[in-house]
Image (cartoon, rainbow, N blue to C red):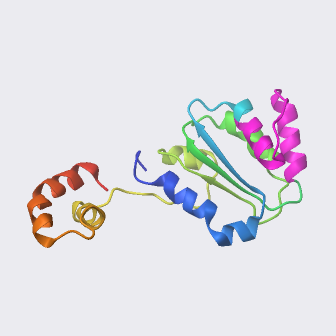
Amino acid sequence: GMGGVGKTTLAQLVFEDERIRTHFGNERVWICVSDPFDQIKIAQAIVESITKSSTDLSQLQLLLEKIKSTLSGKRFLLVMDDVWTEQSAKWEPLKNSLKDGLPGSRILVTSRSERVARMMGSVYLHQLDLISDSEAWLLLSRIAFSGRREEDCEELKDIGQEIAQKCKG
């Protein structure tokens, strides 16, 4: 979905959910990818997250081997937030290093591009769309007018609806 619709927020809610924490334990990794897709930086971030310590490794192959050996036989959740690249050649080496995780391991990807999600081999796609103007107004008014007198709310209703329409939620 487009920027600002809540992809990262939804992924964070999943990542922090108590059931997810219980299911995956300490093998939960959050990586902010953004652009450009730097394989070495991403691999370093994964290694540091799963080993809970910094790494001096800077060669991609060594990093991928470390990921593979550390996650082998474990059930893990890897969240890759804000992925932009559509180049599968950049994704494949990392993907291959994750294949020895236990069944039930998951990779959750957020992206503005459905093509990215498909290129990464996503099985389930969840498209987040903009909310309607009336839903945006309801959300804004609940937050902005909570605990206020009704007269105050009426005075601000028109401008509030304009703001809600522009924000799209």
Q: Quadrant of residue 43?
A: top right
In front of the other: 110 or 51: 51
Question: In this image, 136 relative to 80: left or right?
Answer: left
**Is 48 colored magenta in this rendering?**
yes
| Residue 125 visible to the viewer | no
Q: Is residue 39 magenta?
A: no
- Residue 156 placed where, x, y %? 13, 59
Q: Position of residue 59 (x, y in %)?
A: 83, 27
- Name the quadrant of the C terminus: bottom left
Check the image and report above or below for 45 versus 144.
above
Residue beneath the point at 61% across and 54% down: 122
Residue 116 in picture, x, y percent from top left: 55, 44
Q: Residue at x 66, y 30 (%)?
A: 38
Residue at 67% from the left image edge and 72% from the top image edge? 19
Q: Residue furthest top?
A: 58
Magenta region, main secondary structure: helix
Q: Is residue 169 left or right of residue 101?
A: left
x then y, percent, for residue 105: 75, 61
Query: Vertical placement of 163 versus 124: above or below?
Result: above
| Residue 152 vertical position relative to residue 1 in the rendered view, above or below | below
Q: Residue at x 89, y 59 (%)?
A: 73
**Quarter holding residue 46:** top right
Q: Is 137 in front, or is 156?
A: 156
Q: Nearer the viewer, residue 81 or 137?
A: 137
What residue span does the magenta drawing correspond to?
A: 42-71
